Image: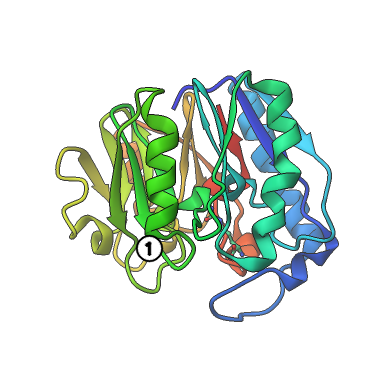
Amino acid sequence: FRFTHAITRRPAQSIIRGLRAVDTGNPDLALMQSHHADYIAALKATGATVIELGALEDYPDSVFVEDTALCLPQGAVIMRPGAPSRLGEAAEMAPHLEKLYAEIRRIEGAESFIEGGDILVTEREILVGRSARTNGEGVAELTRLVSDWGHTVRELHTPPGVLHFKTDCSLMDGETVLSTDRLAASGCFADYRVIAVAEGEEASANAIRFNDKVLFPAGFPRTRDRLVAAGYDVVEIGNSECAKIDGGMSCLSLRF
Ligand code: CIR
């Protein structure tokens, strides 16, 4: 959760065609841009360098850069998003990571699909939830790619109907995760301290610990209060527009 860099991408006008499980109306671009600016300012306030990439109109969901790559200390792995409309976003990210990393590896198998939103990196292991976007072949290929970098991958299941593994959980520090009850009930965090998301506030499980701050979606006061009581410095960021297309705090950046 200590990072010197983040990569973000400006939302495109095509964001109104962003994928969503349930249609509750299109995001308002101007409001999303304002939330996005607040998000970037919060990252920078911790002292990190933020690389802000330009909008990609051909990819409505490209603001959600997290899904395109996994950034580890030893190198970066380019993902193969399982959403057909998002597959090309990974190739758009690769040249930027090539400038920053000595070693880049790629998920390449024609049957392998994996999105960064399904990957939670803790200080001990990499947890990957299979989902509608991430399959067993994708997890197996990632496992092979990172093993000689010293990483262990543990394969889990994203709860049914939940977009990504990290839709329902976030790393708060080396031993603590924020999680919904429906995900923690699977026992996947038995070796961690778990802070439970308040009932009815499941949409706040996707937050990020970034250096000394926790970036947390606005509008979930009971869960926010639990984090504050646990000693975290919580910064609330508006997420109403990203939420309409199933996006949250982690999706909006690559962190390394
Ligand atoms: C999608 O369905 O792919 C986007 N509308 C939302 C992606 C959210 N990304 C993430 O959780 N890492």
At a point 39% along the width and 37% down the height, the residue shown is 144
Residue 156's place in the image compared with 102, above or below, is below
- Locate ligand 1 by image quadrant: bottom right
Q: Which residue is mark 1?
A: 202
Percent across and percent down for residue 113 are 51, 57
Percent across and percent down for residue 71 are 54, 32
Local SS, label 1: helix
Let me know if residue 205 appears in the view: no
Judging depth in this view, the residue of 196 and 16 nearest the camera is 16
At a point 64% along the width and 67% down the height, the residue shown is 84
Percent across and percent down for residue 14 are 81, 66
Let me know if residue 28 appears in the view: yes
At a point 59% along the width and 37% down the height, the residue shown is 254
- Under mark 1, the amino acid is Glu
Q: Quadrant of residue 182?
A: bottom left
Judging depth in this view, the residue of 193 and 143 nearest the camera is 143
* Crowd band around label 1 with a 10 angstrom C-alpha radius: few (<14), some (14–19), many (20+): some
Left or right relative to 256: residue 8: right
Residue 13's place in the image compared with 73, above or below, is below
